[in-house]
Amino acid sequence: MNIENCPRCGQLFQKVTRELCPNCLRDLDKKYEIIYRFIRKKENRKATIDEIEKATEVDKEDIYRIIRLGKINLEHFPSLGYPCETIGCTNKVTKGRLCSSCMESIQDDLNQISRENERELKRKEEEKARYQTYQTFDNF
């Protein structure tokens, strides 16, 4: 039994598969319906997050949460997206948590660390092979 606080409202709930409590999920479903009714209209399909927020009075964070939950298919609404979670990055993301440039940067850093670890391991092995000696004990 996993009991947690809802990250949206703070209420205790039994977490099974969802990150939010049942009340917040119902509230988000209602907000999703409002948003979807708005963007379903042909003239609103290219609306930005700010335009949707202004027209529907749904908070940006709730719009982002609805998109992250996968309720809105971003392939059909190209101007929608949510901010990259990297501190200081302002790029929009349509899938995952990080933009492609931040992902590439992290991957480059990981590759560099891996290369440095391999070099250090190789250096230690060479040093160990160089100083391998045998000692004998003489009985005097």
Image (cartoon, rainbow, N blue to C red):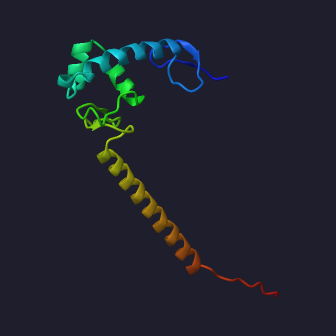
128 or 22, which is in the foreground? 22
> Horizontal placement of 105 versus 129: left or right?
left
Measured as percent of width and height from the top left, residue 106 is found at 37, 49
Residue 49 picture quarter? top left
Toward the front, the furthest residue is: 42
Toward the right, the furthest residue is: 139
> Horizontal placement of 55 versus 2: left or right?
left
Number of marks in the rendered image: 0
Q: Residue at x 49, y 13 (%)?
A: 10
Q: Residue at x 38, y 24 (%)?
A: 66
Check the picture and name the quadrant holding the N terminus. top right
Q: Considering only vertical position in the picture, is 29 above or below 80?
A: above
Q: Is residue 59 visible?
A: no
Measured as percent of width and height from the top left, residue 21 is found at 52, 16
Check the picture and name the quadrant holding the C terminus. bottom right
104 or 15, which is in the foreground? 15
> Horizontal placement of 130 versus 63: left or right?
right
Q: Residue at x 63, y 23 (%)?
A: 2
Toward the left, the furthest residue is: 43
Q: Is residue 8 visible?
A: yes
Q: Considering only vertical position in the picture, is 127 above or below 79?
A: below
Q: Residue at x 64, y 82 (%)?
A: 133
59 or 39, which is in the foreground? 39
